Amino acid sequence: MDLDELRKQESVSPEEFAYLTGRTIKAVRNLMDRDQIDVNREGFPGSLRPKRFVLLQLYWVKMRDCRSIVTTEEKEWINHLMKTDAAYRRVTNKTTNNAFRRNKARQQLNQSL
């Protein structure tokens, strides 16, 4: 599977996540055990060891603001996402310019006085 296709997957295995982020598999499993990343568990109810998959898209959204534990590969991918205008607007929910909002708020304040 192509790297870009893998990055767009909804959930990935720990091995694929380790490949994408540049971490070791042991580090990824530790993150999964400590609930530091969102995990989807698949198995029969009451099973002792269900298969676990990392919810990759939720991980990208959370890492957008917290870059302290991000690896270099993740930084490159996040920067790529932020450089495309449509993705940046979708992730940050920005539809208008902040300066326009400030001016509009200032005008409303002046009108109320």
Image (cartoon, helix red, strand yellow):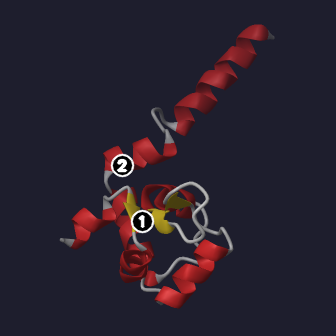
Neighbor class of circle 2 (other Cα within 10 Å; few <14, some 14-19, many 20+) is few
The residue that appears at 66% across and 68% down in the rendered structure is 35
Task: Identify the residue under disc 1.
Answer: 78
Q: Is residue 6 visible?
A: yes
Residue nearer the viewer, 112 or 51? 51
Please state the total of marks drawn on the protein image.
2
Most extreme residue toward the top is 112
Residue at disc 1, secondary structure = helix
| Amino acid type at mark 2 | Ala
Q: On screen, 100 above or below 7? A: above
Residue 87: assigned label:
2
Q: Is residue 68 visible?
A: no
Contact? badges 2 and 1 (CB < 8 Å): no
Q: On screen, 109 above or below 86? A: above
Most extreme residue toward the right is 113
Counting from the top left corner in percent of width and height, residue 108 is at: 68, 15
**38 left or right of 105?**
left
Q: Quadrant of the N terminus?
A: bottom left
Q: Tell me which corner region of the image, top left, top right, bottom left or bottom right, holds residue 65.
A: bottom right
Q: On screen, 6 above or below 100? A: below
Marks 2 and 1 sit apart, C-alpha to C-alpha, by: 10 Å
The residue that appears at 36% across and 59% down in the rendered structure is 81
Counting from the top left corner in percent of width and height, residue 97 is at: 49, 36
Residue nearer the viewer, 98 or 43? 43
Q: Quadrant of the C terminus?
A: top right
| Amino acid type at mark 1 | Ile
